[in-house]
Amino acid sequence: MKKVVEVNIGGINFTIEDDAYIKLKSYLARFEATLPTEDAKEIMEDIEIRVSELFQKEIKYPSQVVDEKMVDTVIECLGEIDQAGANNQTGNKETNTNNSNNKKMRSEKKLYRNPEDKKIAGVCSGLSEYFNIDVTLMRIIFIVALFLYGSTLLIYIVLWIAMPEALTVSQKMEMRGESVTAENIKNYSGNK
């Protein structure tokens, strides 16, 4: 028999085994210790949202308890904490930039509307991120197609409805094809 606790991670309630909770709490505490104090709260909220997304993918049925194996899977997905980077925060900024650029791994891009660069709904901006096309060129293509073919407006509206908006940091990273690891979330949130 194992002790379980109720926790709220990223706004979602989970029932988690005590051993798994201790392991996850320790991981998050180690990660938070590497953050600059002014950005720590915001970055930790992003990390918690990502943890809850990963737990939701792992849970097979509604009343399933999060166990240590699931926590290990989440830690593996997010990546282990770079303690050397934490100790070297006061070091040369150029070196830190090179290290963070080397660690940015690429993953498969996902199609989202881009709320950060939108004129109407972010459809053209999201498509330009997905296809690696300049956003201005994508907008010109839509405008030219609108005058040549009247159905382009309907296509835009359908895409507006069908494409989800990238709201969380992990969705924005997926839109750009960046791996959603703890280190990348920290770097992404710090560069906003």
Image (cartoon, rainbow, N blue to C red):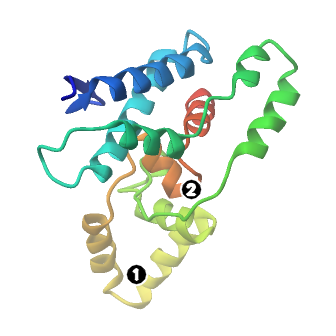
Residue at 46% in and 63% down: 110
Count up the numbered dots: 2
Check disc 1 and give the amino acid type.
Leu
Residue 78 or residue 132, whichever sits in front: 78
Is residue 51 visible to the viewer in this orientation of the structure?
Answer: yes
Q: Is residue 161 above or below residue 43?
A: below
Residue at 87% in and 29% down: 95
Check disc 2 and give the amino acid type.
Arg
Residue at 64% in and 57% down: 106
Lateral position of residue 173 relative to residue 4, left or right: right
Return the residue at label 1: 146
Q: Is residue 176 above or below residue 38?
A: below
Return the residue at label 2: 176
Lateral position of residue 103 relative to residue 119, left or right: right
Lateral position of residue 61 relative to residue 98, left or right: left
Which percent across, then down, holds residue 24? 41, 27
Which percent across, then down, holds residue 68? 37, 36
The quadrant the N terminus occupies is top left
Judged from the image, the secondary structure of the residue bearing numbered disc 2 is helix
